[in-house]
Image (tube, grey):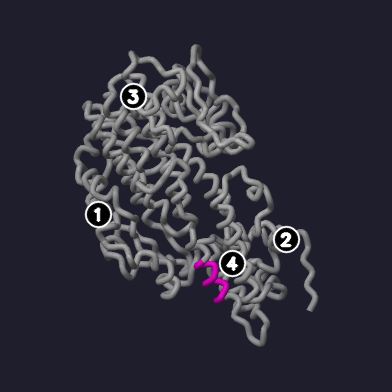
Amino acid sequence: MHTTFTPRFFRFLMLGFALVTASIAHGEDAKLVADLNRSLKNVAQKDRSAPILIPAYLKLTKPPIEFGDDFNQSTIWNKMERWSEVSKWAQANSAMGDALIAAQFATVLGLPYGTKEVDPAWIKAGVSISFGDDSSDGRINFNYFIAMRAIGAYATAEMYRLGEAGKFDEAFVIGIAYARILRQVCEQSMLEEKLFALENLAENLSIHRDFMWVNLDQLPVEVMQKVALKEYSFLKPADNEKLRRLQMPEGDQLVAATVLSRALKSSGGNVDPDQFAQVIGEYEPDSTPMQLFGTQEMWRRIAVVHGSLEASNEKLKNVYDDWWRRWKLRPDSIMQKTATELSRTNPIKYGIVVTMVRDLARVFAWRDAVSAQINGTVLSAGLCGYYLDFKKSWPKSPERAYAVSIPKRFDFDPFAKPAVKSKLVPHLKYRSLSARQAISTPYGPVWASGCMLWAVGANHEDDNGATHSVDGSVGDLVLWPPVRALARQEGLLK
C-alpha cells in the first residue's frame, strides 16, 4: 500500500504533536507506577518532606486574597495592597513555617506517583500525582503544584512579616527553608515537575534578593554573612556552584516506553492501525468528536509507515542516551552545538517517539539559570554584608568580600565561556557604579545604582547588563540590584 503525505498533512501532524502531552500513561498502570516509584523504595519516611509539609498545608487557613496571578510568591511584599491582612494571615499560620523548617533537610519530597499509597485526605485536597481525570484516563496530573505555590506564597509573606518586625534571622530561615523544599522538588522524575521546580526556585531566589534590597539599611551584617557563607551555598548539601548533582528527568522515558508497548502491539509483524490510533487518541486534550476523529484518522495513516516496537524502543533509548551525554557537558561544548538525536529523528517513522519525548533543551537552560540564580544570591547576600560592614559602600570588586562574606567558589557564571586554554573560572560580571545604569527588563526600563552583578546569559556574550531576562535567554541575567524591586521603585509594578 502506498501512502502519500502532503505538506498540509505534515502541518497537521505537527499540530497533533503539540496537542499530545509527554506526561501520559494508561489509567494507573501498575507496572508503570511501580517503576516511577522505584527510587522511593529505599527512602525512609523521615527522609521525605511531604509527610511533614502536606499535613501543615491542609491546615493552612484561607488567605485574604485568592491564590493566583494576583497573589503568589512574586506579588507579595510589604508595600502591596492589603498587606496588613496578608501579614496577619502569615502570622496566623506559623505551623506552616515550623513544617518548612522541619522538612528542609529531607532527602526528597517523596510524593508517590499514583494514588494507591497516598493518604485519602491528601487526594481529597488535590495533593497528589494522579493518572486520569473525568474525561480521560490517560494524563498524569501534577495536582500538588497548587499546594507548592500556596506554600510559596506563605513563605514570602512570612519572610516579609518577620523582616518588618526586625527579625531578619528568622525571616531568612523561613525563606531559605522553602527554597530547599523547591530544590527537593527539582529531583522529581518527570520533566514537567522538574521545569516547575526550577522555574519556581529561580523566581524564589530573585524574591530573596528583593527582600534584601527593600530592607538593605536594616539588615544585620552577621546575618548576611551567615546566609551567604552557610545557607544559600548549601540549598542541597551535596550541590556545588555548577548544580552538578541535579538529575535529568527519567520518568518521561518510562511513560513513553509504556505507551509504545500499547500502541505498537502487532500481529504478524504489522502495526494495527486501529490500536495505534486508539491508544494515542486517548490522550488528546479536550476535543470535539470531529476533532478527535480527525486526529485519530491522522494516526491511522501514520501507523502504515511507523517503525516497529523494537525499532521505536531503540530510537527512544538513543534519544535519551544522547541527552544524558549532553547533560554532563558544559553549555558551550562542541557536542552541545551539534544536532540532537531527537532533531534527527524521522517524525513519521517514529511519530510516537517524537510526540512523547519533548525536547529537554528547556531543562538544560533552566539548570544554568538556576545555577546562576543560586550563585548570584550567594554573592548578593555577601555584597550586602560588605556594604553594611564598610560604611555603606560597595566593594570595587567581589574579591574584596571573599572569605569575609562570600565563598569564592560561588563566584561562577554557568553561562560564560572559559578562556581558551585557561583554567581560570569564569566569574559573574560585577561593576561598581559611579552613575546610574539603565537596564531593559520584561517590566520596562529600570535604573541601577551602587553596583551591578550579572551573568552573561545563554548567548555567552557579555552585554554589560544592559538587557535582562529572567532565564538569561535574552541578553544577560541581572542578579543585583534585583530588577523586580527596581521596577516597583519605578512604578512599573505594584
Q: Which residue is drawn at the image coordinates 42% and 48% (left, top)?
A: 197
Q: What residue is shown at x 59% (from left), y 38% (from top)?
A: 458
Whether residues under marks 3 and 4 lie with C-beta atoms below 8 angstroms apart, the answer is: no
The number of callouts visible is 4
Residue that label 3 marks: 385
Secondary structure of the residue carrying tag 1 is helix
Answer whether labels 2 and 3 touch (C-beta < 8 Å). no
Marks 1 and 3 in Cβ contact (< 8 Å): no
| Label 2 sits on residue | 10
Label 3, label 4: how far apart the Cα atoms are: 49 Å
Does residue 183 belong to the magenta stretch? no
- Residue wearing tag 4: 317
Q: Which residue is mark 1?
A: 52
Q: Position of residue 490 (x, y in %)?
A: 45, 20
Q: Quadrant of the N terminus?
A: bottom right
* Residue 273, image x, y percentages: 65, 77
Q: Which label sits in the foreground, 2 or 3? A: 3
Residue extent of the magenta highlight: 254-262
Is 41 or 74 nearer to us in this picture? 41
Type of the residue with mark 2: Phe
4 vs 1, front mark: 4
Mark 1–mark 3 distance (CA, rounded to whole Å): 33 Å
Q: Amino acid at mark 1?
A: Ile
Does residue 493 show up? Answer: no
Q: Nearer the viewer, residue 24 or 431?
A: 431
Above or below for 181 versus 353: above
Task: For marks 1 and 3, give the one nearer the viewer.
Answer: 3
Which amino acid, by three-letter code, is at mark 4? Lys
- Placement of 367 over or under 24, stated as above or below: above
Question: From the viewer's perspective, is 248 left or right of 151?
Answer: right
Viewer-nearest of labels 2 and 1? 1
The disc, 2 or 1, on the residue closer to the chain's N-terminal end is 2
